[in-house]
């Protein structure tokens, strides 16, 4: 009853704001054009929500765009810096990396893409997507598109909560070089982006990025060197100017160290602690080949790509006689994750009323690891144990899919976005994923948007076959797992009046067969993945923005998440109940502009859980950044995150952090 009253109260607030907003906005704006835009992407044009170029005000899903100019103004030295200033995406840091949540759903329910391509990486619910942002070269990012709400009908598994698509810079005819150097509390960074311009019908770019993660910033985060390299080329067919081949080669390599203090055996805390050092030597390679073209009525793409992540971990322990001398090699593990995809799509523009897209995807996911399958070393009870030499086991998962989407203009006021995906997974059989979106122009100024759809997430190789010993725990997969399924819907009211806008959204997600470790029923200290429960997540998003004056703009956002276990009615862990944010920006509009960004965020009732102990945290955070362009070649950024020294060790919030970044355009 109390839960229902809280939901009704929030909906009443949302309804009241809707009435007030409707009475405030009185001036009209231009209606959307029927045909999708062509040419270069701008902040008003998005491609991730529909897999085709569409105006952001037209698409039914909630989409946020972060451009390269936004990133430069924020002085970001790593992709994780960007999301500290992003509304609607909650971040948390740990020794695993940076976890992102969209609408109360965990990182494992968000699909991360680079130029629309899947990224190989860790595949457990605890680690999925927590390290992927740190491995991306920030200098090559052109824009980031964040889609909130299920995208499974177009993208398949892993997109239950939303999609984050990082779109990189494309080759163009003008040659240029951009050099950046950044330093701060967390890291130092150097990057180079070179566009070689046109050589006949061939265009080429080169990106290089070196990052040094500093040890002193956060003892719970790994420190060390990470390098990224990327070479991209485009070849335009001489006699078919609307057809081109694109080639992309990307490599990441890192050598990281993590010092920690852990129980000798977590089953017996009275035995005390031991100092440990973990060494991580990782590398990642990606190759992508793409052919695209267009006619008066069609746009088509055929692409093949493969992405492989290699991981090698060594654990050293200090001896009792020398607690800081890590010479005892205690354990070692290796893992290889490979994703290979062949995909294609064709969009046909049928008159002024239909943009019909038909596509396919054939996907192979391969994993070879010492942490899966039957272990070489076992304990007396048949469980895996730490060892210096272990057997590697390998598993492969195949799937293929067909999907169709129509952008259907019924009238100047009403647009429908129906989509349907058929997917066959060789482990779990067939699944059909439907979705329907709607955009209704109530007036030229006001829009109602709604979405309802199904989502799914197939169990990963690790969830099915894990066999891993870690600090006294046995972590085991489960070949009998079933896929997770979701039913999601949302409804939004959007208004725009010149330079002011408002958006209010109610969303509802129900996830069944949720996969997690069953901590309630351990067997001989073994924790096994199970389909343990269902989750019910309701929420409200309110966003208001306006141009305050010639030089000042402001933006407010409030998010409320009611994320509970559908069976026990207990709150889901490691989530905030409410988040309120404010963003104020100053721009002097001079030829060499000066820009100030002020960001404040208050997080209420963050439920932190570790070892079945729960804590509630409410805390503020304030960031400030200043960006100055001195001339057409040089700009400088200086900023402070967590200005007022909020410190919460459990959440890896450790006080004030500084950043400076200089950029030269040669």
Image (tube, rainbow, N blue to C red):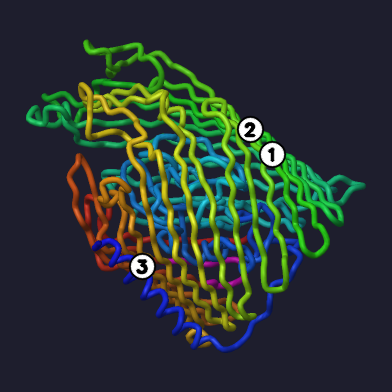
Q: Is residue 400 magenta?
A: no
Mark 1 or mark 3, which has the lower sequence index? 1
| Residue 66 in sight from this viewpoint | no
The number of discs equals 3
Quarter location, residue 393: top left
Residue at 71 percent across and 61 percent down: it is 408
Please tell me which residue lies in front, 404 or 568.
Answer: 568
Judge whether 334 appears above or below 520 on screen.
above
Q: Who is closer to the viewer here, 438 or 315?
A: 438
Residue 148 rendering spot, x and y as whole percentages: 50, 57
Cα–Cα gap, marks 2 and 3: 45 Å
Q: Position of residue 635 (x, y in %)?
A: 53, 67
Identified at 20% across, 28% down, the residue is 325
Circles 2 and 1: CB atoms closer than 8 Å: yes
**Mark 2 lies on residue:** 400
Residue 468: name its quadrant.
Answer: top left
Q: Nearer the viewer, residue 97 or 615?
A: 615
The secondary structure type at the circle numbered 3 is strand
Residue picked out by circle 1: 360
Tell me if residue 655 can be seen. Answer: yes
Q: Position of residue 562 (x, y in %)?
A: 33, 58
Q: Residue at x 17, y 30 (%)?
A: 266
Residue at the disc numbered 3: 623
Quadrant the N terminus occupies: bottom left
Give the left or right position of residue 301, taking residue 240 as reference: left
Q: Which residue is drawn at the image coordinates 7% and 30% (left, top)? A: 270
Magenta range? 629-638
Circle 1 Cα neighbour tier, 10 Å, few/some/many (<14 / 14–19 / ≥20): many
Residue farthest along the left direction in this orientation? 270
């Amino acid at each position: 009853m109390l839960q229902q009253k809280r939901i009704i109260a929030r909906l009443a607030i949302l309804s009241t704001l809707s009435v007030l907003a409707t009475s405030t906005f009185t001036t009209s704006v231009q209606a959307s054009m029927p045909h999708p835009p062509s040419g270069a992407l701008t902040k008003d044009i998005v491609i991730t929500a529909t897999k085709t170029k569409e105006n952001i005000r037209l698409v039914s899903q909630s989409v946020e765009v972060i451009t390269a100019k936004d990133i430069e103004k924020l002085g970001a030295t790593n992709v994780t810096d960007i999301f500290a200033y992003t509304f609607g995406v909650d971040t948390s840091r740990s020794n695993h990396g940076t976890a992102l949540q969209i609408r109360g759903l965990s990182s494992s329910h968000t699909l991360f893409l680079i130029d629309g391509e899947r990224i190989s990486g860790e595949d457990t619910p605890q680690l999925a997507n927590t390290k992927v942002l740190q491995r991306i070269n920030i200098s090559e990012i052109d824009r980031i598109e964040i889609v909130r709400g299920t995208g499974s009908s177009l993208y398949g598994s892993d997109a239950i909560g939303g999609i984050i698509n990082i779109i990189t810079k494309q080759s163009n005819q003008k040659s240029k070089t951009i050099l950046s150097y950044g330093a701060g509390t967390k890291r130092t960074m150097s990057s180079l982006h070179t566009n070689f311009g046109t050589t006949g019908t061939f265009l080429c770019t080169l990106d290089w990025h070196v990052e040094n993660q500093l040890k002193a910033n956060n003892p719970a985060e790994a420190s060390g060197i990470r390098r990224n390299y990327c070479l991209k080329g485009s070849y335009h067919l001489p006699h078919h100017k609307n057809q081109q081949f694109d080639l992309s080669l990307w490599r990441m390599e890192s050598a990281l160290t993590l010092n920690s203090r852990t129980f000798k055996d977590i089953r017996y805390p009275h035995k005390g602690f031991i100092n440990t050092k973990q060494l991580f030597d990782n590398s990642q390679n990606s190759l992508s080949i793409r052919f695209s073209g267009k006619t008066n009525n069609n746009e088509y793409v055929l692409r093949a790509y493969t992405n492989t992540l290699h991981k090698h971990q060594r654990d050293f322990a200090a001896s009792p006689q020398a607690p800081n001398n890590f010479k005892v090699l205690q354990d070692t593990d290796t893992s290889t994750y490979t994703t290979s995809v062949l995909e294609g799509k064709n969009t046909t523009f049928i008159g002024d009323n239909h943009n019909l897209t038909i596509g396919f995807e054939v996907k192979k996911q391969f994993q070879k690891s010492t942490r899966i399958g039957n272990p070489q070393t076992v304990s007396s009870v048949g469980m895996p144990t730490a060892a210096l030499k272990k057997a590697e086991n390998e598993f492969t998962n195949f799937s293929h899919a067909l999907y169709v989407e129509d952008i259907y203009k019924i009238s100047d006021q009403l647009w429908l976005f129906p989509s349907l995906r058929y997917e066959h997974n060789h482990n779990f059989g067939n699944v059909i994923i439907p979705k329907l979106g709607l955009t209704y122009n109530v007036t030229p100024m006001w829009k109602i948007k709604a979405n309802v759809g199904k989502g799914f997430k197939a169990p990963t190789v690790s969830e099915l076959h894990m066999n891993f010993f870690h600090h006294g725990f046995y972590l085991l997969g489960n070949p009998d797992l079933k896929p997770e399924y979701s039913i999601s819907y949302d409804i939004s009211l959007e208004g725009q009046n010149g330079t002011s806008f408002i958006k209010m959204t109610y969303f509802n997600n129900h996830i069944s067969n949720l996969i997690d470790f069953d901590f309630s029923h351990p067997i001989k200290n073994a924790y096994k993945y199970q389909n343990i429960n269902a989750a019910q997540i309701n929420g409200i998003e309110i966003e208001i923005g306006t141009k305050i004056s010639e030089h000042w703009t402001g933006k407010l956002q409030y998010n409320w998440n009611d994320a509970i276990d559908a069976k026990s009615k207990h709150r889901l862990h490691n989530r905030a109940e409410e988040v309120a944010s404010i963003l104020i920006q100053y721009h002097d509009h001079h030829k060499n502009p000066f820009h100030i960004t002020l960001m404040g965020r208050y997080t209420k009732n963050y439920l932190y859980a570790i070892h079945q102990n729960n804590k509630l945290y409410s805390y503020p955070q304030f960031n400030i950044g200043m960006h100055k362009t001195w001339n057409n070649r040089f700009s400088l950024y200086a900023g402070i995150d967590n200005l007022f020294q909020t410190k919460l060790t459990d959440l890896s919030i450790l006080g004030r952090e500084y950043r400076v970044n200089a950029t030269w355009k040669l």
